[in-house]
Amino acid sequence: MSLKLQNLRKQFEEEELDAILISSPENRRYMSGFTGSAGWLLISADDATLATDFRYIEQAGNQAPDFQIYRIQRGLGWLPEWTAEHNVKRVGFESQDVTISVHQALLKAIEETENSNHPELIPTSGIVEKLRVYKDADELMLLTEAIRIADEAIDEVAPRIEPGVTEESIAWELEKAMRERGAEMISFDTIVGAGPNGALPHHRADETVVKPNDAIVIDMGAKYQGYCSDLTRTVFVGEPDDRFRRIYDIVLKAQLAAEEQVTAGMTGKEVDAIAREIIADAGHGDDFGHSLGHGVGLAVHEYPHVGPTAEEDVLEDGMVFTIEPGIYLPGWGGVRIEDIVVLEDGKARVISKAKKL
């Protein structure tokens, strides 16, 4: 039995469950190793089943050796069949992933079953996600590779950015550079915000043309064997002026302070406050409107939360998260700098290596 299954089953008593139905692709992959695009995990105290259709039967058998493979024929009748076979009464489902229409279809399948076992579906949230927050050595190796790919890509592309190119072309060059280094795909749509567009934290790269003396916020990431990286650098086309230098230095000071001072046992709120106080003392408290960071793994945004409302997210060894303060000034632009760190021996080790100004 895998350690992941053992840790999940420990949650059953607290959640008052006999079993759990896992539908989230990231959670399905984490628990079983199965990378197919369709399937469900059904896990009880003494059984682990992967239900999928004929397209993935062989793949499932190869990738999920700890699971029994159940071939789905049609509809959702397999759920009441499985719960009857395993005498399961209370089945948790991932309420953050299951749509209303799928939930109704599951209930209908249960109601229409001919056997006497009609399990109760119990909404759950975050059970597997909170197990994923601790990265083992294999996961950390894959994350480090995803981070390396993005680091090297921006270090190659950024020095070549010149006036006259578009944000879209920069995003494309970054994606090509990541794929050439082994990325299976980008982990999210690349953000390139030139000049005033840099004041929009999640600006989508468009046909905006880079001008001389533009600051450009670039937020990008690679996906490698399912694991994501997330990197932000702010570059300047030409010689940085005094205003840009001042804003950049404030953001960098806030980021480095958070990276140096975070310790295991602090909450996400406490770490956020380290950077936020520096930015506020510099007169830009209202210009830093997002959280300091977030967890990264199979999803580009996952536990733990690192922000002003994360008073219950305690940071511990083995957790991987971003530290990404920013200042955004409408009509002028913005500066954001983002690294990924891992807590080890109570302190943060910075994994991101891309150059900063």
Image (cartoon, rainbow, N blue to C red):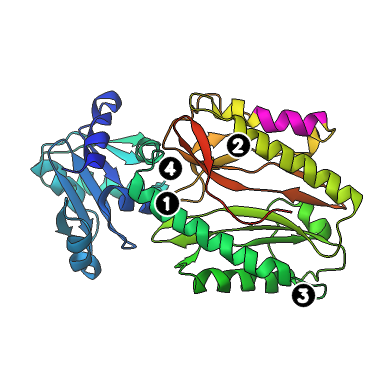
Badge 2 local density, few (<14 within 10 Å), some, or many (20+)? many
- Considering the numbered disc 2 on the image, is that residue within a helix, a strand or a loop? helix
Asked which secondary structure carries label 1, the reply is loop
Label disc, if present, on residue 96 of the rendered structure: 4
Judge the density around disc 3: few (<14), some (14-19), many (≥20) Cα neighbours within 10 Å. Answer: some
Image location of residue 314, percent across then percent down: 48, 26
In the depicted structure, whether residue 162 falls above or below residue 239:
below
Which is closer to the viewer, label 2 or label 1? Answer: 2
Res. 259 mark: 2
Residue behind mark 1: 298
Do tag 4 and tag 2 residues touch (Cβ < 8 Å)? Answer: no
Q: Nearer the viewer, mark 3 or mark 2?
A: 2
Give the mark toward the camera: 1 or 4. Answer: 1
Q: What kind of secondary structure does the magenta stretch mostly adopt?
A: helix
Numbered tag placed on residue 355 in the rendering: none
Task: Tell me the distance, in whole angstroms, between the alpha carbons under discs 1 and 4.
Answer: 16 Å
Give the crowd class for mark 4: few <14, some 14-19, many >=20 residues within 10 Å: few
Q: Is residue 301 left or right of residue 75?
A: right
Q: Image quarter for residue 198?
A: bottom right
Q: Residue at x 21, y 36 (%)?
A: 6
- Per the image, label 3 sits on a secondary structure element best described as loop
Mark found first going from the N terminus, 3 or 4: 4
Q: Quadrant of the C terminus?
A: bottom right
Query: Image height check: is 203 above or below 280?
Result: below
Q: Earlier in the sequence, mark 4 or mark 2?
A: 4
Answer yes or no: do the residues labelled 2 and 1 have beta carbons within 8 Å? no
- Report the amino acid beneath label 1: Leu
Give the residues in magenta: 273-281
Residue type at mark 4 is: Gln
Does residue 280 show up magenta in the picture?
yes
